[in-house]
Amino acid sequence: MDVLVIDHPLAQSRLTAMRDERTDSSSFRAALHELTTMLVYEAARSFPIERYPVQTPVTATEGTRLANPPLLVPVLRAGLGMADAALGLLPESSMGFVGLARDEETFEPRAYMESLPRDLNGLPVLVLDPMLATGGSLEHCCRLLAERGCTDITVLCVLAAPEGIERLKRSNLPLRLVTAAIDQGLNGSKFIVPGLGDAGDRQFGGM
Ligand code: U5P
């Protein structure tokens, strides 16, 4: 599994704002939005393009567009804060949704919603979830996509724990990971350390 870490200074400054416990929800959402734009920009570097004729005011030339814009799949609830930024850079993309809750005793994900095209053959997918902790949620989500025929998954997250990366590697699913940082690891409550806390609560408040 390819892992791409975006260590650009502008990305790292947004990540630091998100880590800071004094950052309020509104500023946290703004930093997540901007950071997602940077992660999508870098993830899209390897997307296939096609050339097509275009007329400028001066002459005829050739233009570039994405050959196959990916399906965007934010993982609810925390991935919602990445959806608008991703759609901004990929306006031709469609969006599906997967809702996952983590059981706080077993730490395993439970799906409460799936809204995806039935057939994902030939369609690349960009999965949006800020945190890769144990990897249970993202493995579950990517398995749903692979079962529908998807063979090209890019997982976009803000923070990844080594434990989650290992789990995704072992899954043998057809995916690559783009993240702004790989943190030290998980604590006893399976939170990422140093991390940024609960990405859903930081954006939308505690439930
Ligand atoms: N999560 C956090 N912060 C953490 C660890 C996990 O917000 O430090 C939440 C995220 O919402 C993420 C989910 O979607 O748990 C991933 O957990 P896991 O299935 O990778 O363990």
Image: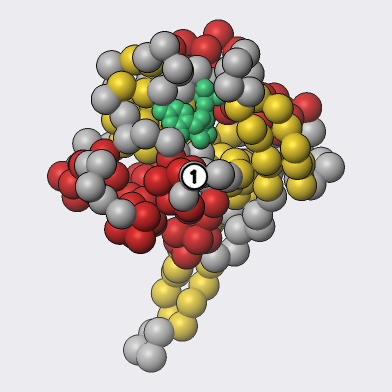
Image position of 186 with respect to 178: above or below: above
Report crowding for label 1: few under 14, some 14 to 19, many 20 or more residues within 10 A (C-alpha). few
Q: Amino acid at mark 1?
A: Gly
The residue singled out by tag 1 in the image is 206
SS assignment at label 1 = loop
Of residues 30 and 146, the one nearer the viewer is 30
- Farthest residue, direction bottom: 57
- Farthest residue, direction front: 207
Which residue is located at x 18 percent, y 46 percent? 13
Residue 91, position as x, y percentages in the image: 54, 65
Residue 75, position as x, y percentages in the image: 59, 41
Q: Is residue 25 left or right of residue 100?
A: left
Quadrant where the C terminus is found in the figure: top right
Q: Is residue 65 left or right of residue 179?
A: right
Image position of 42 with respect to 179: above or below: below
Disc 1 beta carbon < 8 A from ligand 1?
no
Of residues 113 and 41, the one nearer the viewer is 113
Tell me which colouring the rendered structure shows.
secondary structure
Residue 35, position as x, y percentages in the image: 33, 50
**Residue 119 at least partly seen:** yes
Which residue is located at x 32 percent, y 35 percent? 196
Numbered-mark total: 1
Which residue is located at x 37 percent, y 23 percent? 192
Q: Where, by quadrant of the figure, is residue 60 drawn?
A: bottom left
Q: Is residue 96 left or right of residue 25?
A: right
Residue 97, position as x, y percentages in the image: 68, 47
- Farthest residue, direction right: 118
Which residue is located at x 28 percent, y 16 percent? 184
**Residue 174 at least partly seen:** no
